[in-house]
Amino acid sequence: MSDFWNNIRRYPSFFVSSLFGSILVILTPFKNLLKNPNIRIFTIGLFLLFFINLYFILKTMVAL
């Protein structure tokens, strides 16, 4: 029974490390895109366009 509670206590650290590792794996290709100066401007523009579009969509959905 003590092994069970030991595993339950270790679960939060496993969850945080798994989440952090997943975020790193997802963001690595974007980091590689930012190395080239020509593609950097395009990538930053796409990110800005994505967030502006997301802002207007959410603003319309909430009807503000």
Image (cartoon, rainbow, N blue to C red):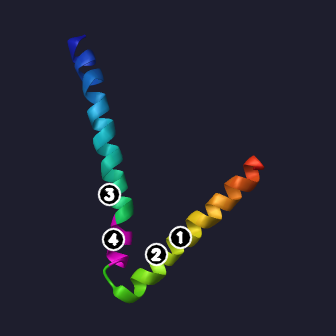
Of tags 3 and 2, the one toward the viewer is 2
Residue type at the position of mark 3: Leu
**Mark 1 touching mark 2, by CB under 8 A?**
yes
Circle 3: element type: helix
> Which residue corresponds to mark 4?
31
Q: Residues within 10 Å of mark 3 (few under 14, many from 20)?
A: few
> Which residue corresponds to mark 3?
24
Instruction: Using the image, determine if residue 25 lies above or below residue 16.
Output: below
Q: How many marks?
A: 4
- The residue positioned farthest toward the top in the image shown: 1
Q: Residues within 10 Å of mark 2 (few under 14, many from 20)?
A: few
**Mark 3 touching mark 2, by CB under 8 A?**
no
Residue range of the region highlighted in magenta in the rendering: 28-34
Circle 4: element type: helix
**Mark 4 touching mark 3, by CB under 8 A?**
no
Of tags 2 and 4, the one toward the viewer is 2
> Which residue corresponds to mark 2?
44
Percent across and percent down for residue 32 are 32, 75
Distance in Å between CA atoms under marks 1 and 4: 16 Å
Distance in Å between CA atoms under marks 1 and 2: 6 Å
Mark earlier in primary sequence (1, 3): 3
